[in-house]
Image (spheres, rainbow, N blue to C red):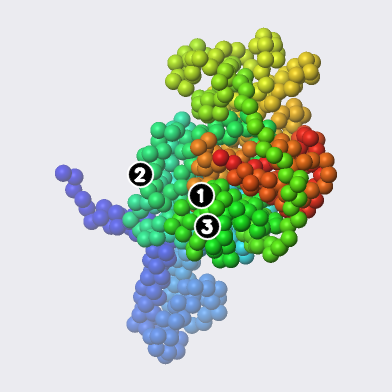
Amino acid sequence: MEKITFTDRLRYAFDNAMSRGTANLIGWLAIITLVLTIIFALLASIFNLVPTDQGIMRTAWMCLMRTIDSGTVAGDEGSWGFLGLMLVVTFSGIFVFSTLIGILAAGLEAKLDDLRKGRSRVIENGHTVILGWSPQIFTIISELVIANANLPNSCIVILGNRDKVDMEDEIRTKVGPTGRTRIVCRTGKPIEMTDLEIVSLNTARSIIILSPETDDPDSWVFKTMLAITNHPERREEPYHIVAEIHKPRNIGVAGMVGRDEAQLLLSGDVVSRIMAQTCLQSGLSVVYMEILNFKGDEIYFHAEPRLVGKTFGDSILAYEDSSVLGMQMPDGTTVVNPAMDTLFGEGSKVIALSSDDDTIRLSGLTELNIERDRIAAPVEIVDKPENILILGWNWRTRTVIDELHKYFSPGSTVTVVADVDDSTAGKIQASPTIHRDTVTFKQGDTTDREVLEDLNILDFEYVIIMCYSDHLETQSADARTLITLLHLREIEDAHGHNFSIVSEMLDISNRELAEVTRADDFVVSDSLISLMLTQLSENKDLGRVYDTLFDIRGSEIYLEPMSNYVKIGDPINFYTVVESARQRGEIAIGYRVGYQVRDASKAYGVVVNPHKSSMYTFKPNDSVIVLKA
């Protein structure tokens, strides 16, 4: 064995001492200074080098002053022995304190570098934590800023695997001023328990987990939820976690991991359902965007003791500037559009659409001026076959087709045209979702005008454009959607045939560019999911409401001809429209102006939650927005 010398041990001890950080080095320098001061004071006293008899303590003080300030030696007087000793003391002090300055400078630089990297612990309370980084984060931050506008000290803490400064710069560029809301960024991996300690999860109001842009984002979400729920220092109170799951087969596992602490959003199913509903209900995507973003009217749960003993039907007419959608029972059960004779009990809450939580107030009106003679008799709607064309393909298209089948009348068909390779085409045709009797699949470039012309496109009434998000990056996928839209509108103008077009886009900024194509509806999938995640982070009970609104088995939103509900042509208040819908077991929550469907500045004609006592003159092309089973 190699022999270890005393010098080796001394060097090893020195290396360990040097590696223990700035505070430890300063401590060693203080000890060295103290030792040198005592040694030189003893030498001066032993050899009687001090000019006057001033004692050992006074001598030690003289030595310490010369150690700290090298200029002090210039004023010394006395024997050459005393001057020589003080000169040695001064040189020792220069060495010690130059080393101290270097250590302090290096320590300060290391601390600033550590702060720049975002590794310091956050001390916040009641804040929202966002774990992960993706393009969705900018919509989420923007919506949270609006939601927290009335709060004096709100905070959003972000933990992402990116440089802190880069995250702050990108948020500043894409979100802009955040008002009263402070944005705090930290660098780390949300799947690491030690990194989660940085963002103070135990004092957070809610936690939003963003899915990364990887081939298997769900596994990353699982790991993050496990790190949160199984942290050894977690709080006893349940967390409020909101997370997005992509694949339906993973929702069960995610539920087991998150248990009752996580509100999970199956994004693929939600977007697909909205695409299917919007395809047959022009303008529906605008209604959903109005409901889901904090700029307009949102859904709130509100306790109103004065409704106890009243029926749900009574509550619909009890609010002037809020629209009642349902009720939460005393046991926490949420019911959207229950039977009109359902009674409010002690502890029941009203689920209402309103501009803010403090605007949900009873009108107190006793005379609603409902013109019952203007209420139209129900019109029996005869279902007819629909021919639907789907252009493009991504992983959500299968679910869109499956959702469309739930709304199909006998004889309806779906034709899918997509620019995919032979392997993908084979998988599509072999998919159990592709019903052989109603679905036809063709390969073709959907941006090619000749391909579209050869489809006998005039046979279709409804067109859905799916973005190629599986293989193309965001801007390229949206560009192909825009090209397809332009071709469709040219064909429409050339042949005088009207399509109802629903387009899926990824980047909401491209929606403005797409307005020139006059598409009827845009479903910006990432933005839509971001809005829902934000809403759920503010109120987890909204999950049950969304489950009903986006499921054919529950009550859904429809746009029906206004003339089917009231006699049009003359001014009428919206209370009359609400009463007409109420008599049918439906809830009228707004209307759409027919001549404004192409006007973005007028929200494409959609008006959600209008004042019920105001007078409106409806025309033949106007629609009523109703919630019905």
SS at badge 3: loop
Q: What is the number of the mark on residue 335?
A: 1
Determine the CA span between mark 3 and mark 2.
35 Å
For residue 169, say whether it is visible: no
Relative to the observer, which residue lies in front, 478 or 572? Answer: 572
Q: Mark 1 to mark 3: distance in Å?
A: 12 Å
Of the numbered discs 1 and 2, the one sitting upstream in the chain is 2
Residue 408 coordinates in the image, percent (x, y): 56, 25
Q: Quadrant of the C terminus?
A: top right
At a point 68% along the width and 46% down the height, the residue shown is: 580
Residue with the mark numbered 3 = 343
- Mark 3 and mark 2 lie on one chain; the one further toward the N terminus is 2
- Residue type pointed to by label 3: Leu
Q: Nearer the viewer, residue 12 or 626?
A: 626
Q: Residue at x 67, y 41 (%)?
A: 625
CA gap, disc 1 and disc 2: 25 Å
Quick one: label 2, few (<14), some, or many (20+) residues within 10 Å?
few
In this rendering, would 35 be left or right of 626? Answer: left
Place residue 521 in its image quadrant: top right
Secondary element type, mark 1: strand
Could you say which disc has been placed on residue 69 in the image? Answer: none
Please, what secondary structure does the residue beneath circle 2 have?
Answer: helix
Check disc 1 and give the amino acid type: Val
Which is more toward the observer, 81 or 270?
270
Left or right: 125 as drawn, with respect to 456: left
User: Outermost residue toward the bottom?
Assistant: 53
User: Looking at the picture, how far across and down is residue 341, in whole percent?
Assistant: 55, 53
Placement of 527 over or under 448, stated as above or below: below
Q: Which mark is residue 256?
A: 2
Image marks 3 and 2: residues in contact by CB distance under 8 Å:
no
